[in-house]
């Protein structure tokens, strides 16, 4: 083991031992993470006979976004190897809930161990996978190195290394080079991801470029029967335009609200729907909007299919509803992009054939941005003033909104099949 790996092992061990008593006390006092903490430190119940079949494939998808990428890949690999056993781990409770809802009952869902060497070793010995598959950017050195030492094959699929992540990894390149050279395949989303992971230390002969598996699942989620249900939920009875700002982050809501105030000067019946990236901020946003002289309602307070909606602004304070809510939008803005936060997945509204707006900071989703802009379905805005102009443009020109929205959906439809390509990479690795 090289000095970088030894240093990482020492640092993570020290941090784990320092944090564990506080984590246990916090769980005892608050009740939070009670369902996950044992597994997070590497203590798992016996999985047999729940997990049966061969080969045994462990997918790790940290949260909801990675779970959405994992679902079509798992479906494809099970078609290729119908007798395989699949285990999927997440690090968050929301990810765990989504995985259990999206995957069949014979897929075992667990919580992932933290990257402490004993926790990782206990978990790997209990689960005994033939292959450990990490989704997107989940590169945990202790976990991956111990798996390699145990003779377990390791892979990253739907791999994504943003420019920001790449810079962070380059600071610990001696460590990452040692980790990456022990892995078996890197099935990346686009060429820039492949180049970055090679720069960090992945052997070039192990790298493939196979597209983004999330595109495959998005098409299936855009069921036209959802739209009238969502319209009733939000109390939309007429043809009022809807400006939906999804996955907004701190500091963006003020810009969005100022843009909305400019929009309603010319289109006063426009409904604004804000879906914060972190729903726990909903009450703060509610207070902020009220202080700015506008009325608003939380989505959870809309009763009788939205019959009691009276406000021009709705805040989505629930998890898992944003994707369906995009179906009723006239125009969409995707957050995390007006501030340097890397952006959000702009293909989620695109699949509903909506014009998609986003700010200049899209480093984490450059493939999606390039894809939408190639068909004319995605449009970047510079600031709040530009956002207001673009929103008003599409609200007042429904024919142009329809044309741009269709171009956005076309971009998604043109790039189907990535999940199967990633699954084929796994299949060939399993066959040796």
Image (cartoon, rainbow, N blue to C red):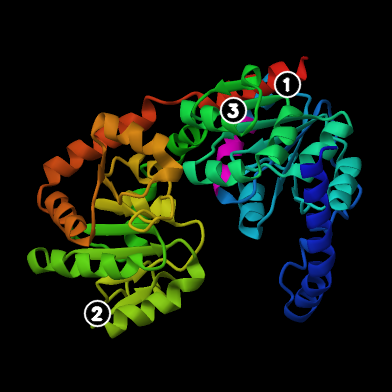
Residue 270 seen in the figure: yes
Q: Is mark 1 on a helix, strand or loop?
A: loop
Which of the marked residues, 1 or 2, is nearer the chain's N terminus? 1
Q: Name the residue under label 2.
A: 294
10 Å crowding of disc 2: few (<14), some (14-19), many (20+): some
Q: Residue at x 29, y 36 (%)?
A: 408
Which of the marked residues, 1 or 3, is nearer the chain's N terminus? 1
Q: In this view, does 282 lie to the left or right of 100?
A: left
Q: Which quadrant holds the C terminus?
A: top right
Q: Residue at x 69, y 26 (%)?
A: 78
Q: Which quadrant holds the N terminus?
A: top right
Q: How far apart are marks 1 and 2 (CA)?
A: 56 Å
Q: Give the range drawn in magenta.
A: 65-74
- Look at the magenta stretch and give its main secondary structure: helix
Of residues 90 and 182, the one drawn nearer to the viewer in this rendering: 182
Return the x and y of residue 275 as percentages of the image width and height. Answer: 40, 62
Return the x and y of residue 304 as percentages of the image width and height. Answer: 39, 71
Q: Mark 1 points at which residue?
A: 81
Q: Distance between the residues labelled 1 and 3?
A: 30 Å
Q: What element carries label 3?
A: helix
């Amino acid at each position: 083991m090289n000095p970088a790996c030894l240093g990482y092992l020492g640092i993570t061990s020290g941090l784990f031992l320092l944090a564990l008593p506080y984590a246990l006390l916090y769980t005892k006092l608050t009740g939070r993470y009670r369902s996950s903490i044992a597994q997070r430190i590497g203590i798992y119940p016996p999985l047999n006979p729940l997990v049966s079949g061969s080969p045994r494939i462990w997918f790790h998808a940290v949260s909801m976004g990675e779970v959405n990428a994992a679902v079509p890949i798992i479906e494809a690999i099970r078609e290729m190897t119908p007798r395989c056993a699949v285990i999927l781990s997440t690090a968050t409770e929301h990810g765990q809930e989504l995985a259990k809802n999206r995957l069949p009952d014979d897929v075992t869902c667990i919580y992932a161990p933290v990257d402490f060497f004993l926790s990782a070793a206990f978990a790997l010995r209990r689960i005994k996978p033939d292959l450990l598959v990490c989704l997107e950017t989940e590169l945990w050195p202790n976990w991956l190195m111990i798996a390699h030492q145990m003779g377990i094959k390791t892979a990253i699929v739907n791999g994504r290394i943003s420019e920001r992540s790449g810079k962070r990894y380059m600071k610990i390149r001696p460590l990452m080079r040692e980790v990456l050279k022990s892995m078996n395949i890197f099935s990346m989303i686009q060429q820039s991801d492949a180049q970055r992971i090679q720069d960090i230390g992945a052997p070039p002969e192990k790298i493939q470029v196979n597209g983004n598996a999330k595109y495959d699942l998005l098409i299936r989620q855009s069921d036209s029967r959802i739209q009238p249900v969502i319209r009733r939920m939000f109390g939309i009875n007429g043809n009022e335009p809807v400006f939906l700002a999804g996955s907004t982050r701190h500091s963006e809501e003020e810009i969005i609200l100022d843009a909305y105030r400019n929009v309603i000067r010319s289109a006063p019946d426009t409904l604004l729907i804000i879906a914060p990236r972190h729903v726990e901020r909903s009450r703060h946003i509610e207070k902020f909007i009220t202080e700015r002289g506008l009325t608003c309602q939380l989505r959870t307070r809309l009763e009788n299919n939205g019959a009691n909606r009276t406000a021009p602004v709705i805040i989505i304070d629930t998890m898992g509803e944003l994707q369906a809510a995009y179906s009723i939008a006239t125009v969409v803005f995707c957050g995390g992009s007006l501030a340097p936060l890397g952006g959000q997945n702009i293909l989620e509204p695109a699949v509903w054939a909506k014009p998609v707006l986003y700010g200049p900071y899209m480093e984490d989703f450059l493939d999606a941005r390039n894809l939408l802009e190639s068909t004319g379905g995605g449009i970047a805005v510079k600031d709040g003033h530009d956002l207001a102009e673009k929103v008003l443009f599409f609200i007042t020109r429904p024919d142009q909104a329809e044309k741009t929205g269709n171009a956005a959906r076309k971009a998604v439809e043109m790039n189907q099949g990535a999940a199967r390509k990633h699954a084929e990479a796994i299949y060939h690795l399993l066959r040796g």
